[in-house]
């Protein structure tokens, strides 16, 4: 599906972007693979690693619709990964987060429509579900924009879907590199927020595979949620440094004890497939789709009306050895 196609990824120099580019170059022969982001140094460093002739490095800001429209000329598939995603930074600089995560999302939509891009997938997070911080709220608004974009696409061929998951093992600014840094600096104890805290856990490889599959599965308008395990923060700390003491520092502003990927209120829209859930759009589109049969021919069934996909109630928690191997391959 990606051979001889032109692909653009916003935020292509980030954790997801790096791995996405690696997987695409190892498995496909795209016509063009465009990395779109702001910082020239990150692009320069990435270019030292990935310099296949199909690669294009575009400096640009998702806040700049004109630049996005230029960059998407001749593009078939777009992955929207660019975001400001540090919870405290978003609380202190709300308008900056809104401009990148919400206005940026709308600009990606407009640029994709203007260029008759075939398919667009935007990345979302569990923090967008019942959000309690601005980062999550902006990602929720972004998700809504992408889903509703299928309606404004009338007369265009472009379809839009969202892929939503939880913590990515070892991604920039996440807990794992933080713990590793503290250990390297000789820390005598590791800070943990609350011993009850749980998180959904996904590797970059799984995240990229999910996005690639979603391109094949999508009708447009769905939110794809993978079935992934949970981890407990104490297990995580113990798996990295079994002999270090843990120091409880309390939940930080904007943090939850547990995360949710599908709420009880979503249940009536959720379909269960073998390895993922699909949240159907709550709004009606002019061209309705049968979401219970995806474009790969897989069938999904409605879930129980009490269904909630909650990191603390997840039947699948990682055992210590699984946890260790999940981050050994990543960091
Ligand atoms: N990491 C996780 O645990 C996680 C979990 C769930 C969902 N997600 C979602 O997955 C996506 C990718 O996350 P990630 O971990 O790869 O993030 P990341 O490592 O922080 O990368 C973010 C990327 O976005 C670019 N960017 C930021 N602001 C931009 C702007 N205004 N215009 C253009 N590019 C911009 C950054 O490059 P420049 O700074 O050079 O512009 C960088 O390439 C995000 O949408 C995030 O919400 C992440």
Image (spheres, rainbow, N blue to C red):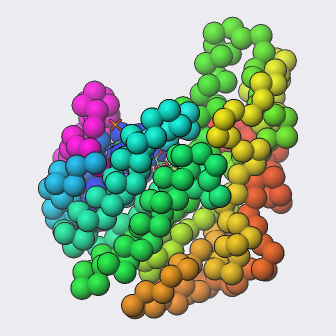
Quadrant of picture, ligand 1: top left
Front position in the image: 154 or 185: 154
Residue 102 inside the magenta-drawn segment: no
Give the residue drawn at x 52%, y 90%. 290
User: Relative to residue 287, is residue 77 depicted above or below?
Assistant: above
Give the total of numbered labels: 0
Front position in the image: 232 or 150: 150
Front position in the image: 84 or 300: 84
Where residue 147 appears, x then y in whole percent? 45, 72
Left or right side of 33 for 215: right
User: Relative to residue 326, is residue 101 depicted above or below?
Assistant: below
Give the residue drawn at x 24%, y 80%. 156
Q: Quadrant of residue 14?
A: top left
Region in magenta: 38-62
Q: Quadrant of residue 129?
A: bottom right
Give the residue drawn at x 82%, y 25%. 248
Residue 38, can we see it?
A: yes
Left or right side of 274 for 118: left
Q: Quadrant of residue 31?
A: bottom left
Where residue 183 appears, x then y in whole percent? 68, 16
Q: Quadrant of the N terminus?
A: bottom left
Residue 61 inside the magenta-drawn segment: yes
Q: Quadrant of the C terminus?
A: top right
Where residue 37 appears, x then y in whole percent? 29, 42
Residue 126, can we see it?
A: no
User: Relative to residue 156, is residue 40 depicted above or below?
Assistant: above
Where residue 310 appears, x then y in whole percent? 76, 58
Give the residue drawn at x 65%, y 16%. 182
């Amino acid at each position: 599906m990606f051979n001889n196609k032109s692909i653009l990824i916003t935020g292509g120099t980030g954790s997801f972007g790096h791995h996405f580019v690696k997987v695409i170059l190892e498995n496909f022969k795209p016509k063009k693979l465009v990395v779109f982001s702001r910082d020239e140094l990150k692009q320069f460093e990435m270019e030292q690693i990935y310099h296949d002739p199909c690669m294009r490095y575009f400096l640009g800001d998702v806040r700049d619709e004109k630049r996005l429209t230029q960059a998407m000329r001749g593009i078939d598939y777009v992955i929207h990964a660019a975001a400001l995603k540090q919870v405290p930074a978003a609380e202190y600089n709300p308008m900056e987060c809104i401009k990148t995560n919400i206005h940026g999302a709308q600009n990606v939509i407009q640029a994709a429509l203007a260029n008759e891009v075939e398919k667009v997938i935007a990345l979302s997070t569990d923090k967008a579900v019942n959000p309690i911080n601005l980062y999550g709220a902006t990602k929720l608004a972004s998700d809504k924009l992408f889903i509703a974009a299928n309606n404004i696409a009338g007369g265009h061929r472009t379809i839009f879907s969202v892929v939503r998951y939880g913590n990515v093992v070892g991604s920039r600014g996440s807990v794992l590199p933080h713990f590793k840094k503290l250990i390297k600096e000789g820390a005598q104890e590791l800070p943990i927020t609350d011993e009850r805290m749980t998180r959904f856990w996904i590797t970059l490889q799984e995240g990229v595979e999910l996005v690639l599959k979603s391109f094949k599965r999508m009708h447009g308008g769905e939110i794809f949620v993978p079935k992934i395990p949970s981890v407990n923060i104490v297990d995580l700390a113990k798996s990295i440094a079994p002999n270090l003491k843990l120091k409880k520092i309390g939940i930080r502003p904007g943090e939850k004890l547990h995360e949710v990927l599908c709420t009880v209120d979503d249940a009536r829209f959720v379909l269960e497939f073998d390895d993922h859930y699909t949240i159907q759009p709550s709004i009606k589109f002019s061209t309705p789709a049968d979401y219970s049969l995806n474009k790969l021919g897989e069938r999904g069934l409605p879930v129980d009306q009490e269904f909630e996909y909650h990191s603390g109630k997840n039947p699948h928690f990682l055992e210590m050895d699984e946890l260790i191997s999940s981050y050994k391959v990543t960091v």
